[in-house]
Image (spheres, rainbow, N blue to C red):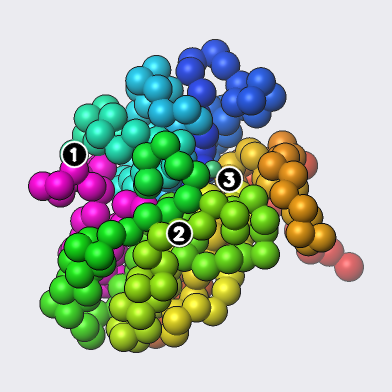
Amino acid sequence: MLIAQISDTHISAPGQKTCGVAPMAENLAQCIDSINALDPKPDLVLLSGDVTHSASQDETRHAADILSALAMPLFVVPGNHDDRQLLSKVLGPEICPLNKDGYADYVVEGFPLRIIALDTLDFGKPGGLLTEARLKWLDACMREKDQQPTIIVAHHPPLKLGVPESDEDGFVGAEALGKIVAAHPNIERFVCGHIHLHTNTRWCGTVVTTATSPGMQLTLDLTGKATSRFLLSDPSYLLHHWTSDQRLITHPILLSPLGGPFEFTG
Ligand SMILES: [Fe+2]
Ligand SMILES: [Fe+2]
C-alpha cells in the first residue's frame, strides 16, 4: 500500500502568492502531477491541514480546483489556517467528512492500513485541541480493531519538537492522546504537519512523522528563538510505503528543479 502525504499547502486566492512570495498553487499542482505519475500509483492521498492560508472561501475554492486533478482518493484534515466547515462543503464530504458534532474525525477503511483522521483545529488559535469526548471516540475506535495496523493523521504534532514556533502553539489534550496511543501498539505511525519541516520522533510507543510544506520551509533555529520565518522551498511531499512484510517506510519526495534522472557512472 502506498500513501502520499501532502501538508501545509497554504493556498492563497487565485493569482496571489502566499505571503507575497511563495507560489504555493503552482507547487501543489507540481506535487499532484508527480503523485499522479507514480508507478505504482498511491492508493490514496492524505492532506494534513493548512490547506489554505487564511481560511477564506476564495482560497478554499482555489485549493479544491487544484486538488481535483488528483487521480486517487483524497482525505483531508483541517489545520489552524483552515475552516473545517468550508473545507467539507467546498472539497466535499467524501474528502473531508464531518461527524455529527461538526468535527473532521473519521476512519478510512478498506486498505491494509486503517487510517484514523483527527481534527485538531482549535478555531482562531494556532495550537491543537482534542476534547475528552473526542478522545473517547478515538479509544473506542481503536478498540474495534486492535490488531489492524493503523495510521493516525492530524495537523498538529502531539509533542514538542524543539521548534519554538510550533512548540509555543501547544496542544490541549496531547497528554491524554498519548495515553491512548501508548495503549494501542498497532498504531504504526502518527503523521502530521504544522511545523513545515520533515521530522521523525519516537512518542508513546509509535513514531510521529511531520511532513514538509511544499514551498514554505520553516527556518530551523535550534537556539530556542521563535523567528516565524520561512525559506522558499521546492515542491515536496511524503510517500509512505507499507510493504508486504509489514514495514512502513517513509520517503520524502523533493521535486528538484536541477534535472535528471542521470546514470551513476564511473
Ligand atoms: Fe502550516
Ligand atoms: Fe499549522
Sequence-earlier tag: 2 or 1: 1
Q: Are marks 2 and 1 in contact (CB under 8 Å)?
A: no
Sequence-earlier tag: 3 or 2: 2
Mark 3 secondary-structure assignment:
loop
Which residue sits at x=49%, y=15%?
A: 14
Residue 93 numbered mark, or none: 1
Q: Horizontally, is 95 left or right of 261 in the view?
A: left
Q: Name the quadrant of the N terminus.
A: bottom left
Residue type for callout 1: Pro
CA–CA distance in space, label 3 to label 2: 20 Å
Mark 2 secondary-structure assignment:
strand
* Residue for badge 2: 171
Relative to 211, does residue 241 appear above or below in the rendering? Answer: below
Q: Is residue 111 magenta?
A: yes
Which residue sits at x=28%, y=59%?
A: 131
* Residue for badge 3: 213
Q: Characterize the local packing of mark 3: few (<14), some (14-19) or many (20 or more) Cα atoms within 10 angstroms.
A: many
Residue type for callout 2: Phe
- Specify start and end residues of the magenta stretch as a single range: 94-120
